[in-house]
């Protein structure tokens, strides 16, 4: 057994994943412990406003880099990657300035659309959050390219711990959602600062590589990302935000807050681990693609092992979620456990598919991925509308989960077909020119 563990640790892939997961797991464990207190400090309405803020941010960050941060891993030349990093940063600054103008000009209108006047003062922080997240994601991808997984883990820890601590401290002295939102912004700033300081120390000389004509050339070179990935991300994140938007507008801010709490407790640990695998697998598979090495067996092994490890815990948590939420967070949050119970199949599918979601990018299939997410949006919207018409949050969430699970399952099967179809003897490698379909 000990020898088997040593062999696993010698494997670079598992070592890199373990580096990311170990750091994020510590931060996540701390975050969950903090939520034992936060659930008793903040109300359902506070979490509803917080949920609105986070879901607005999930939409604006799609534009923050025009998804060029995904291209940072692809070039063989490090000079090109540095210029893609610079391009992502410039776009983030420009988008944030535009958002600032929009918020100042249309604050009242946005509040009416969202069905919440409480969100009004927090909209002014959205441009800053958008900028910080855009820069964080670009620097994280460049760190991933350099295999600096300890740095990525450190940035994740810094972001999570500072976020949680400020939420706790402000929650004790300020009434309302202020602590939750300021905590998130402070965490974003802390995570970005960790990356910025580390890269200024080790990559300062590479700043001289930045050239606007080169950024312009690369923007055209990787135009698939804003043309398809950006709109795919917008559709996907908007459809993910639909429950909060619709529950807030047609039920109440409290219902939106209960859903937000249940979703966050369930989704955060899954997304942290899945993102760790995503980052390492993306970098590893791009290298293999450059060497024309097959990846099919690794994809199949990952899916099989993930199902073996996670299926039983998901089933058990799904059965006892309301009781677990009531015991850990207080009886007020038992309903959040029921919501978590309903969305469990969807979150399980996310744990399988999120780490492999870069596969369409590798094979220039962003257009098809965009269509699939469009279908998922329509299915999710239809489910929630049915819930609104019948006045049942449970029915709306159940149909939303059904649509999500079926479409994500189709995506997984499609990813496997893509990998099979693009085995090395048939592969054309990583795209170096735009797709003009």
Image (spheres, rainbow, N blue to C red):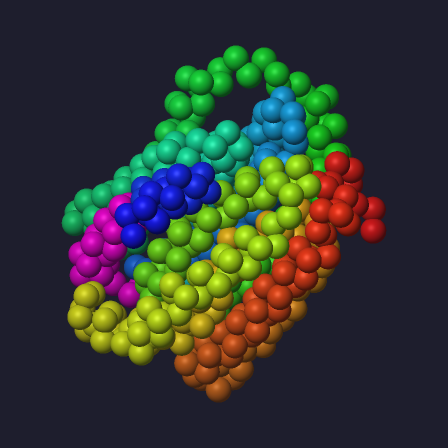
Q: Is residue 379 left or right of residue 43?
A: right
Q: Residue 228, relative to residue 432: is it above or below? A: below
Q: Residue at x 75, y 36 (%)?
A: 432
Q: Residue at x 64, y 48 (%)?
A: 294
- Quadrant of the image occupied by residue 190: top left
For the view shown, which residue lies furthest in the right direction? Answer: 437
Q: Can see residue 185?
A: no
Q: Residue at x 68, y 58 (%)?
A: 420
Along the line of sight, the residue nearer the viewer: 315 or 138 = 315
Tell me where residue 181 appears, x and y as whole percent: 34, 48
For the view shown, which residue lies furthest in the bottom direction? Answer: 390
Q: Residue 59, relative to residue 411: is it above or below? A: above
Please check the rendered image and state whether residue 360 is part of the magenta-colored stretch, yes or no: no
Tell me where residue 281 appears, x and y as whole percent: 52, 46
Q: Which residues are magenta?
A: 24-45
Q: Can see residue 323?
A: yes
Along the line of sight, the residue nearer the viewer: 394 or 76 = 76
Tell me where residue 59 appears, x and y as whole percent: 53, 52
Q: Residue at x 33, y 43 (%)?
A: 6
Q: Main secondary structure of the magenta part?
A: helix
Along the line of sight, the residue nearer the viewer: 27 or 325 = 27
Please check the rendered image and state whether residue 44 is part of the magenta-colored stretch, yes or no: yes
Tell me where residue 15 appears, x and y as whole percent: 39, 41
Q: Is residue 130 left or right of residue 70?
A: left
């Amino acid at each position: 057994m000990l020898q088997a563990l040593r062999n696993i640790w010698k494997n670079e892939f598992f070592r890199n994943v373990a580096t990311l997961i170990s750091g994020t797991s510590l931060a996540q464990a701390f975050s969950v412990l903090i939520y034992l207190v936060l659930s008793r400090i903040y109300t359902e309405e506070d979490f509803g406003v917080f949920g609105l803020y986070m879901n607005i941010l999930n939409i604006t960050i799609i534009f923050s880099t025009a998804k060029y941060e995904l291209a940072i891993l692809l070039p063989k030349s490090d000079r090109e990657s540095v210029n893609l990093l610079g391009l992502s940063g410039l776009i983030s600054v420009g988008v944030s300035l535009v958002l600032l103008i929009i918020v100042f000009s249309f604050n009242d209108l946005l509040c009416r659309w969202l069905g919440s006047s409480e969100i009004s003062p927090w909209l002014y922080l959205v441009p800053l959050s958008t900028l910080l997240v855009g820069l964080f994601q670009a620097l994280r991808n460049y760190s991933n390219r350099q295999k600096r997984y300890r740095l990525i883990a450190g940035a994740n820890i810094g972001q999570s711990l500072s976020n949680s601590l400020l939420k706790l401290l402000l929650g004790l002295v300020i009434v309302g959602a202020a602590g939750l939102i300021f905590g998130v912004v402070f965490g974003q700033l802390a995570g970005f600062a960790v990356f910025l300081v580390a890269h200024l120390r080790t990559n300062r000389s590479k700043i001289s590589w930045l050239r606007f004509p080169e950024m312009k050339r690369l923007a055209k070179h990787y135009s698939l990302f804003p043309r398809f990935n950006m709109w795919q991300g917008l559709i996907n994140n908007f459809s993910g935000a639909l429950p909060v938007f619709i529950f807030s507008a047609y039920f109440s801010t409290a219902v939106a807050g209960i859903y937000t709490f249940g979703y966050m407790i369930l989704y955060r640990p899954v997304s942290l681990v899945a993102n760790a695998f995503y980052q390492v697998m993306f970098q590893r598979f791009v290298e293999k693609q450059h060497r024309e090495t097959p990846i099919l067996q690794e994809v199949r092994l990952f899916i099989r092992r993930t199902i073996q490890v996670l299926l039983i815990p998901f089933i058990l948590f799904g059965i006892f979620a309301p009781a677990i939420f009531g015991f850990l967070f207080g009886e007020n949050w038992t309903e959040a456990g029921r919501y978590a119970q309903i969305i469990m199949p969807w979150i399980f599918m996310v744990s399988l598919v999120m780490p492999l979601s870069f596969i369409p990018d590798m094979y220039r299939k962003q257009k098809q991925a965009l269509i699939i997410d469009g279908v998922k949006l329509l299915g999710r919207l239809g489910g929630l509308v049915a819930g609104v018409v019948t006045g049942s949050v449970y029915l709306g969430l159940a149909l939303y989960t059904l649509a999500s699970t079926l479409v994500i399952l189709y995506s997984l099967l499609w990813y496997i077909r893509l990998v099979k179809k693009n085995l090395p003897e048939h592969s054309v490698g990583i795209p170096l020119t735009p797709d003009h379909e």
